[in-house]
Image: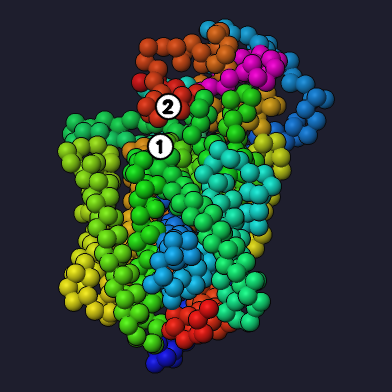
Amino acid sequence: MKQYAKIIWALWIILALVGGYGLIERLVTGHQLATYSSYVPWGMWVAAYIFFVGLSSGSFLLASLYYVFKITRLERIARLSLFTAGVTIIMALVTVGLDLGRMEKAVSVFYRPHFTSLITWEVWLYTAYLILVIMALKYAVRKKLKKLDPQVTKDDDQRLKRLMTYGIPLVIAFTGAGGALFGTISARAAWHTSLYPVIFIVGALLSGVALMTFMAWAFCDNHDESWHELLQFLGKLVLGLICIELILEWAEFSIPLWYGVGSEAELVKFVLFGPFWYVFWLVRILLGAVLPLYLLMGKKDAKSIGIASFLVAVTYFAVRLNLVIPAQVTPELRGLEHAYLDPIGNHLSFHYLPSFFEWQVLMGVVALGMALFYFGQRYLSLMQTLNNREVSR
Amino acid sequence: MNKDRPDRTPESEERRAVLGKMASATFAGLMLSGVLARAQDAAPQKTPIPARPFKGSSDANQDVLIRMQGELERAMQKPINERRWGMVIDMRKCTGCASCTVGCVMENKLPPGVVYRPVIDEEKGTYPNVTRTFLPRPCMQCETPACTPVCPVGATWKGADGIVVIDYDVCIGCRYCITACPYQARTFDFGQHWTDNAAKGEDGALALKSARAYQDPPNFEYGKEWKRREGIIPKSPVGNTRKCTFCAHRLKVGMLPMCVSTCVGRATFFGDLNDPKALVSELAGMANATQLKPEAGTHPNVYYLV
Ligand code: SF4
Ligand code: SF4
């Protein structure tokens, strides 16, 4: 890890500079530089938002395996997982906040909520979750930072367990509701499936666990026996989740495509054979499933597990993109694409390719996430726990 | 455009002056309807709709515009919840001229990227056996709108008279409603202006002046004055979702929706579907009256005669 510190710093500085400029542009020019439109109203930022939410839910559930279900071999990774859950949910909220047309009014979801909307439910559940994660982190961390009265430590452990227990249904609720947010939109044939809440939960677990497995591999310098055991365990978990996810994805794609008739079949064909076919075949299937499966079932050494998990976690973004974008690229009324054009910003278009500005803003959010991680490892002794270098309780 | 012209000639100056005057006159004319609506709206009780010979009448022999005007005034006498505004568009008469689109853009002062009533031009068949159909697409003011329950802050709802409205002061611009509409009748105000990247060169200043004369004055949707502006905290409706309201601000003062008034082919009909004698009710009840995407379950209040 230490040998990569310079590279990570350099990367962070680039992301922070480029992304910071993007964030300023976002504030000054609003949405004008984005390429999403009135016909593809949700672009890459929405995909990134559900991607980050998935990472958060998955890492939280992984942490709960230790804090609630006492799977002790996860102890080393539990606190880092909980912290990752907090960081990624913040990244998700920042991303979706920047996606709003009127960011300054976002708080109105609290004082004038409209509970028929799944967005309202999501905002309320995320807020409860963020508070819960912060409280849980407090109890998980403070006993490691300073010497506490044994009774306080015991109370903290109990509180932590209780919080994490409440957190499980909460996480399942908002992750499933994330799927429902799309699934309930009957106007978009590709979204309108009851499978989405389930796919979202499995996808969250897969991407979150894969991210934590990668971190356990990359950020740990103490490669002792228990670390190898931890990685083997996590590797199997990732392998199992990839398989379940692939089955669900098969169901999602094959059902509309089987007879090849109907608008949904067209949308699936767009994903598989359209102009962005490589996002599915190369990024999603090759890098996100075939290669990781090969690595996880082959040598099964720590490096293979680490690299496989990295690939799964990162390429899951392609799954999110394929979920959000293709459902919007065909006109609901044939011919609408030519009916009236926007000569200034092309915001009445069905073609969508994220602009550099959108990538910039995303880089800014990633830089923010990295900064929060730095803070965590610096002040919350997360890495010491991962390296198993502290006095055991 | 005039790069190769060495110097301004007196003729060119004169032409520019004439153009300038024309531009102001045109924009004044275009603005008139909106200004009128606002002026009347400012004191609605004190400004009775002037008496006209056709007031409240439903004479089948009248010009349809005159008949609909009378029916509109009759409907406005009723309590709001007894009206149900509807529209009928005769696709056989629509010539695809897009006067309705342009009228709507002018009336609501729509910026680039925002459109309430595009006309879809569909070509069918292969040459030489080709036909074209034109389908103007306003908001359907659905009976069970798909766009309203999704709003996280209740910024959009179906009013008592059946018009689906958006409160720009409340909308947070999440665009969920845009995804939910099966007719893609909602567009997002990205904060663009017609003068962005506008003409440069010799006539650039004149072009900008003319365009600004159009874009800078406020619009009067929902009977309120909106001065849109981009910025760190934009001014509504920038950053909001926007949609057709059947020109609710015009109806309030007894004027037909702009697209009905500007329809060259007399192909757009408007009125109270709760009034059995109204022209729209008659037309909507015809055997060839259809709705767009009835399978969407939204029960549109816009009918098409095919
Ligand atoms: S046409 Fe679309 S925007 Fe208009 S009421 Fe229906 S669902 Fe809402
Ligand atoms: S864009 Fe505005 S009106 Fe539409 S759902 Fe969001 S807050 Fe509501």
Which amino acid, by three-letter code, is at mark 1?
A: Ser
Q: Residue at x 74, y 19 (%)?
A: B50
Magenta residues, as a range? B65-87
Left or right of A85, for residue B212 = right
> Mark 2 falls within which chain?
B
| Label 1 crowd (10 A; few <14 / some 14-19 / many >=20) | some
Q: Is mark 2 within 8 Å of ligand 1?
A: no
Q: Nearer the viewer, residue B170 or B229?
A: B170
Relative to B134, is A37 above or below?
below
Give x and y (percent) for residue A223.
34, 86
Which amino acid, by three-letter code, is at mark 2?
A: Gly
Q: Which secondary structure, mark 2? A: loop
Q: Which secondary structure, mark 1? A: loop
Q: Residue furthest front?
A: A151
* Tag 1 residue: A186
Q: Residue at x 70, y 26 (%)?
A: B253
Marks 2 and 1 in Cβ contact (< 8 Å)? yes
Q: Nearer the viewer, residue A174 or B85?
A: A174
Q: Residue B297: which disc?
A: 2
Q: Is residue B67 magenta?
A: yes
Give x and y (percent) for residue B210.
61, 53
The answer to which image quadrant residue A303 occupies is bottom left
Q: Residue at x 69, y 47 (%)?
A: A111
